[in-house]
Image (cartoon, rainbow, N blue to C red):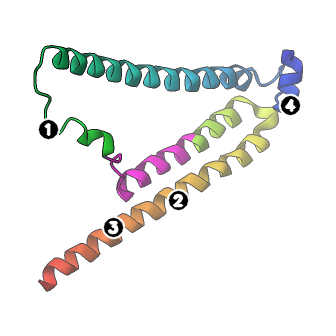
Amino acid sequence: MDLTLLMTLLRLDIGHNTFVALMFPVMCIMAIAIVWITSAEKKKRYELEADLYAKAIERGQELPGNLFDRLGEKKRKKSSLEKGIILISVGAGISLFFLVIALTDAPHADRSLRGMAIGIIPFAIGVGHLLIHFLEKKKQHDRKDEE
């Protein structure tokens, strides 16, 4: 696929919008790199732990009783506060991205400003999570006062 066809599919004009034309592949590469690095680190950590336990078994040492407890544990659930802050940040980041495009691409500023609306969705969901967090906190506080 040549670059002109890719730009046409993305509705980017090479002459006027080089910022977006350069940022799209950079963002894709960064996302792939982040996933690859984190999974490689997790794999390396598990391999080191497995080697440590294998050596302990070879030497006849006792393994800790809670060794396999971690395997059955579920990941910690994110709180509504944490989810809310993350989603608000994502929504603000998306809107800011489209604002920067609008400011740097005057001929297509109206399309970019309309793209800012995409950021409203995660932003609004994040506000909802924050609302849930504070309502639950108030409910817990009220229960403690009753006791």
Q: Earlier in the sequence, mark 1 or mark 2?
A: 1
In the picture, the quarter occupied by the N terminus is top right
Q: Position of residue 28 (x, y in %)?
A: 64, 25
Q: Secondary structure at mark 1?
A: loop
Checking the image for residue 85, the label placed there is none
Disc 2 element: helix
Tell whether label 3 touches label 4 (CB within 8 Å): no
The question of residue 83 being in magenta is answered with yes
- Between the C-alphas of marks 1 and 4, the distance is 57 Å
How many numbered marks are there?
Answer: 4
Identified at 22% across, 21% down, the residue is: 53
Residue visible at 20% across and 35% down?
67
Q: Label 2, on which residue?
A: 125
**N-terminal-most mark, 3 or 2:** 2
- Distance from disc 1 to disc 2, alpha carbons, whole Å, reads 42 Å
Upstream in sequence: badge 2 or badge 4: 4
Q: Residue visible at 50% across and 24% down?
A: 34
Q: Is residue 24 left or right of residue 46?
A: right
Q: Which residues fall within the magenta stretch?
A: 73-93
